[in-house]
Structures are given as structure tokens and as C-alpha cells.
Amino acid sequence: MANAWGLLRCGLVSILLLGTTAVARPMDATPPPSRLDLASRYGRQGYAAFERHDYARAMGLWKEAARYGDAKAMCNIGSLYTRGLGVPRNYGEAMVWLKKGAAAGNGDAMYGVASLYEEGWGVPRKYGRALAWYRKGAKAGSAAAMYGIGRIYLRGRGVRKNYSKSLEWFRRASLGGDAKAMYAMGALYFKGTGVNRNYKLAAAWWRRGAAAGNQSSMYAMGTLYFKGTGVNRSYKLAAAWWKKGADAGNPLSMYGLGELYARGLGVPRSGRKARFWWRKAAAKGNIYARSALAEEGGESWQWLLRSRIVLPIVVTASLILVIFAAAAVKRRRGRG
């Protein structure tokens, strides 16, 4: 009987304890966020800051995401150090973070490590090691790494040039969504490198690259229309494509657009707009734009002669001179 009473008492105590726990923590209480949730949250906030060009904040947020195991954030941090965005450029730190991301299985981080070895940034240049890292990245599904392999074979860096392999890897990277590979595909068909020259296919690949945001593809499309290569010549379409490229930050597109405004091709002639785009291109280091600005500055009198205001100014000045001369003659005759 005593044992029965003891068991009953234990049961009552357990029920009371459960009830107390239920009161202290309601059934609908929100559980604390997991490491995965925190990594995802900081990662998204980092991308938002990056889009606003607030690179320092993006770095801080991605470091928080990396602390919770976000491999993509580790790759992004390495990229910021490589490009010197939000922090002083530091290839050593870039390699540390890229290798962290690579160890966590991120293929794009493997591409980043390979790029540092290929270019010799912060490490001795080693093409064999670069190719090995590109292959690791490609195996992990990185389209950028596939593009890297194609570039290695195209340039013949550490291997014999092999255009067919280059084309194969560029195609795989393009199908994976890599915009630089789409531009490279177009360039191969445009030049006839390793394939039969085909301007229509070049244009098709450059259109895809432009749609994916590649600035070089936008410039290339403008050039096709400007020259009428593989397409019907259209200065208006050339201007439209170069405007897209210029707005995306491509200095060659800026220079080309300036030329169109200076010559009145596809757009109304405007020296002011020509100089505007040439200045933007020159600020990005475009030597053709600098030359155009220097030439225009040295021949400003020629621009004045072409201006619509020259004739009225000349006529007005001539009339004033005639009036003053006639008045002077009349005064002299009056004195005589």
C-alpha cells in the first residue's frame, strides 16, 4: 500500500511539473533560430548591402553568415578582398577565405582559388595548380570554374592550346549560366577560332551574354550593328546597344556612344553628349576617349565653325562694325 501511495505521489508531482513547464513555455512559443536560419538571414542582408554598394556592411554581414557556416558567404568575403571592395585589397586574406569556402564545398570559391594561382595574385603563378582547382570547382558544379578551364585551354596556360576543348568547356559553362562564357563563345564564332566563322552564331551568343548582364557582349552587339557585320547595319541599334553597355559601366561602349553623338549617327548630333560620354570613358582609362577630348579641345575653333550660332554672331558683329564705321565717317565730315 505504501508503494502504491508513493507511485501515486510521484505521478502527481510529475503532472504538476509538466503543468508548470507548460505555463513557463507555451506550446506556440517561437523556437530560437537555427544556425542555418541565421546564416541565411545574414547572407541575404549581405547581398542587399552589396547591391547598394555598401561593401563594408556587406563584408560584416557575410562574416556573420560565415560564422554560422555559410560557404557562399566565405566565397563572397574572398571576392571582396580580391577586388578591394569595402576593404583594402589583400590577396592573402582573399586566399584564406576562398579556401575556407572551398573546404566547405563551394565550387565558386574553388574558382576563386584557381584564379589567384592563374594570375599569380598573392601567390606564385602556377597554371597546373590553377587547372586542378578549376577542375575541382567544375566537379562541384561551378559554371565559373568551367569557364576557367576553357580559358586555360584557349590561352594555352600550362597546357597546349586546344580550341576544341576550350569551346567544349565554354559551352558547358554557358549552359550553366556563366555570362563570360557566353561572350567567349560569341568571340570564338566571330573570329573563327577552332570553329568555322559564323557571325549569326556569334550574335546569338552575344545576345545571350548581354541578357545575362555581360558588358562586353553589349559592346560587341553594338559593334556588329555599327559595322553591319552579320546583321543589317543600323546606327540606331548600335546606339541602343552601346547605351546599354555604357549604363552597365563598359568604357568602350561609352566611347562608341560618344562617337555616334559627335557624328550624328543613329542619334541627333550633340557635342555636349559626345563629351559627356567621352569623359565617362576617359575616367575609366579609355585612351580613345582621352584622345577624342584632347583633339576636340585643341580644335575648339573648328567646333565653333560647325556650330549653328556662328553665322548670327558673325552677321551681328559685322553690322555693329559697319554702324560704328559709318558713325565715325559722319563725325569727321561734320567737323570738316
Image (cartoon, helix red, strand yellow):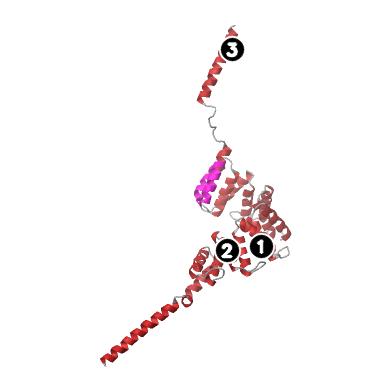
Mark 3, residue position: 7
In the displayed structure, would residue 328 be above or below residue 33? below
Nearer to us: label 1 or label 3: 1
Determine whether, in the image, residue 65 is placed left or right of residue 320: right
User: Where does the N terminus fall, quadrant-wise?
Assistant: top right
Q: Hey, what amino acid is under mark 2?
A: Ala
In the displayed structure, would residue 47 be above or below residue 302? above
* Residue 113 % position (x, y): 62, 51
Mark 2, residue position: 240
Residue placed most toward the observer, 240 or 284: 240
Q: Identify the element where label 3 is drawn.
A: helix
Determine whether, in the image, residue 132 is placed left or right of residue 282: right
- To which quarter of the image does residue 100 belong? top right
* Residue 312 % position (x, y): 42, 78
The answer to which of marks 3 and 2 sits earlier in the sequence is 3
Residue 46 located within the stretch drawn in magenta: yes
The answer to which of marks 1 and 3 sits earlier in the sequence is 3
Q: Identify the element where label 1 is drawn.
A: helix
- To which quarter of the image does residue 4 belong? top right
Residue 188 shows in the view = no
Structural distance between the alpha carbons of marks 1 and 3? 85 Å
Q: Which disc number belongs to residue 203?
A: 1
- To which quarter of the image does residue 248 belong? bottom right
Q: Hey, what amino acid is under mark 1?
A: Ala
Nearer to us: label 3 or label 2: 2
User: Where does the C terminus fall, quadrant-wise?
Assistant: bottom left
- Residue at the limit of the structure toward the bottom, as seen here: 336
